Image (tube, coloured by chain):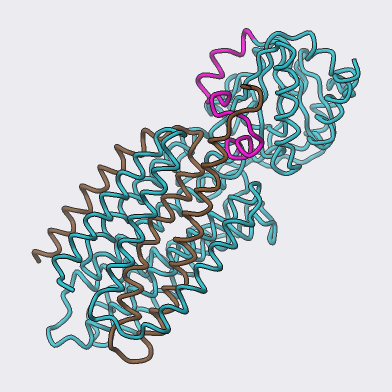
Amino acid sequence: MNSALINLGYLGASALFVAGLKGLAHPRSAPRGNLMGATGMLIAVALTLLDRRMVNFHAIAVTLAIGTAIGATLALKIQMTAMPQLVAVLNGLGGGASVFVASVGLLEFRDATVPALNHFTVAAVASGVIGAVTFWGSLVAFAKLQELITDNAIRFPGQQLVNLALVAAVGALGLWLWLVPEPHAAYWLVVTVSSILGLLLVLPVGGADMPVVIALLNSCSGLAAAATGFVLNNNVLIIAGSLVGASGLILTQIMCRAMNRSLIDVMTGGTQATPGNGRTEDIYRGRVKAASPEEVAPLFDAARRVVIVPGFGMAVSQAQHIVAQLAELLRGRGIEVEFAVHPVAGRMPGHMNVLLAEANVSYDQLKDLEESNASFNRTDVALVIGANDVVNPAARTDPASPIAGMPILDVDKAATVVVVKRSLSPGFAGIPNPLFVDSKTIMLFGDAREMVQAIIKVLKEA
Amino acid sequence: MDTLITGLTIFVLALFAGFEIITKVPPTLHTPLMSGANAISGITIVGALLAAGSERDGISSWLGLAAILFATVNVVGGFLVTHRMLSMFQRKSRTDS
């Protein structure tokens, strides 16, 4: 097939990617946008297969079939609460694919009659480094999210020095690869060192900082694809890769801003203070008002406006359906109900929104940080379900607090705050939450799903 | 050198286009955005197909096939799960009826 035709087809695919991402600007147009992206991909793959240089069709078809089966099974079987894990794995696979493709690109240069152009080698190293970091980093993120390893920050003395040394080693190996006539062994050495770097970069990141890391790895998977595009001199890879790179970077930035932390700070596990549990309990002792669902339920019946604030605890106990049911029940009684979603609630950007969408909550009931904060002062009951640091007023009031300056949901401005939580254990920042001892706060200790269920039961009987 | 400059031009312009488009995505769709964008980054599959399909020795085609497997899971899984999530956003809330 004519290479001009193929390139025109790639251009069409690129246009579909851009238009498809544009479709994601609204929930209504989003499914069509996703379909456009998928169509673009199909066109790109079909054209590549039609390329006359293609041999080995049989093996390729079998591999495509296996990959499709695995991908489809994952996508259709996955629980919505496990979405962060799936996205982490998919990010990693994208990075891994780039590592392999760039290595083949290098092999081709070795055989080429003309000496390899330098920038191709540089691009191959970039692909290998970004791809390997993405792959192994994503695997660590997956293991943490799946709780195969602790989701606490794992740190050891001198970690930053080791990381710096690894970066220097990658740089030196990359340079060496550029100079030696047989770059392939050097390439895999670069990949190996980058793999260790990927592991070490994500290990010190705590569970609640995951939204930042997932967004960053998302960006990296795109940048790796773009770098591979430079290796193969293929524009559709460059365009698609940089679109995704930009997307991930924006999300990373939004997540960092929502925590009032810099990216460096998150990646190094920076400011996390971990006071002993004893101290935390001392702060709370005797000042916390705990209640039963029976005591709390009448508050909802008397309210005119209720705002529900979901957090990771809702995902853990799979409480989204029962929470949606409560919202529906209250709305049926003429009470105004809204959901206030903090950008970093949960383990990935938009995590809570997806769970609530799964539970049939319409997207126009989901309010973001600014919208929600504008309305808490005219809210009768704020129901906090499994969220902690994102509603911690210390961020506003205590300049010495590790989360000082972090934009929070001002639930303490509501008339009454009901907090559903399993225990008084501190959130990711490891600091006590003054909200829990506020005079207008009532604590409901227990599993989110059971507690909300109990409230519904009381409301229905009343 | 020309190919590098062309590539860089495309890269930078696409980055800007990406920034412009993605800034308009509402927070409520951030998860589908990640999975959908991730599926698009599976475009490496094109490179993987070229690598596996080139008339070269064993190593290249094995590396290419491994890349195809990774990228296919990435692409198919990414688009499908995005579709699944987005269709949940379509359902009308029961309370609206």
The residue depicted at 8 percent of the width and 64 percent of the height is: B2
Judged from this view, the residue extending furthest toward the front is B97
| Above-or-below relation of A426 to A248 | above
Q: Nearer the viewer, residue A267 or A31?
A: A31
Percent of width and height locating residue B43: 35, 62
- Look at the image and tell me in which quarter the N terminus of chain B lies: bottom left
On the picture, is A316 further left or further right than A154?
right
The residue depicted at 50 percent of the width and 49 percent of the height is: B82
On the picture, is A103 further left or further right than A454?
left
* Hue used for the chain lettered B: brown
Q: Over which residues does the magenta segment extend?
A: A352-378
The residue depicted at 28 percent of the width and 79 percent of the height is: A106
Q: Is residue A234 visible?
A: yes
* Hue used for the chain lettered A: cyan
Is residue A354 highlighted in magenta? yes
The residue depicted at 62 percent of the width and 30 percent of the height is: A361
Question: Toward which corner of the image does residue A233 lie, by quadrant?
Answer: bottom left
On the picture, is B90 further left or further right than A126?
right
